[in-house]
Amino acid sequence: MASAVVNATASAAAAGLHVPGYFERFWRHIDANCTHFDIAFWGPIILHQVVYLLLTAVSLTLASWRGIDRFKLQPKWPVTRDDVIKCLKLVFFTHIVVESPLYLLLPVYMNWTNTPFDYDSIPVWHTYVWKVALAFVMEDAWHYWAHRALHWKPI
């Protein structure tokens, strides 16, 4: 198995397809200095928040352009700084309260699906398709049942 990986890497490098770069150095550093729990728990949280903030920045930038009001769903309601801050606080509260149990279960899920952490054992991307699809189904079920529980009369 190891010789197949070495041969595939050598073949890819000879073809000019394998360029060890920043991601490989970064991942090897993370794998050497963090536990698998840290990678599986904190990694997705940080990635999710960074992507969310970047997309929010893009949408706020687009919303500030002149003439964009005609494309808004509610063009007569201006978006104020206080509205944005209030919305971000609510979203981050929701991320902490609602999504924390999912993040706590992610290391268990990754062990259950035998997801490797070290760089040399990471398989090709298409082997993760079923794992990601299953994770989406589990997350959707979590949100569905959590939302449904909130409509339960005793709560």
Image (tube, rainbow, N blue to C red):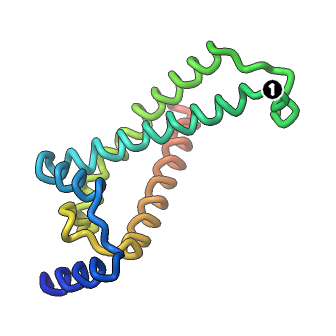
Identity of the residue drawn at 35% across and 75% down: 17
Q: Is residue 86 left or right of residue 47?
A: right
Against 88, residue 138 (above or below) is below
Residue in view at x 14 percent, y 48 percent: 35
As helix, strand or loop, the secondary structure at mark 1 comes to loop
Q: Quadrant of the N terminus?
A: bottom left
Q: Is residue 142 left or right of residue 86?
A: left
Between 56 and 136, the one lying in front of the other is: 56
Q: How many marks?
A: 1
The amino acid type found where label 1 is placed reads Arg
Residue 108 picture location, percent across and down = 25, 56
Residue 104 or 70: which is nearer the viewer?
A: 70
Name the residue furthest top.
82
Residue 11 appears at what percent x and percent y?
Answer: 27, 84
Give the residue drawn at x 28%, y 45%.
41
Residue 72: image quadrant is top right
Q: Is residue 38 left or right of residue 2?
A: right
Q: Looking at the picture, how far across and down is residue 111, in whole percent?
A: 22, 62
Identify residue for label 1. Answer: 66
User: Neighbour class for label 1 at 10 Å: few (<14), some, many (≥20)?
Assistant: few
Residue in the picture at 49% in, 43% down: 146
Q: Is residue 109 above or below residue 149?
A: below
Q: Is residue 19 above or below residue 143?
A: below
Image coordinates for residue 55, horizontal then vertical, percent: 56, 39
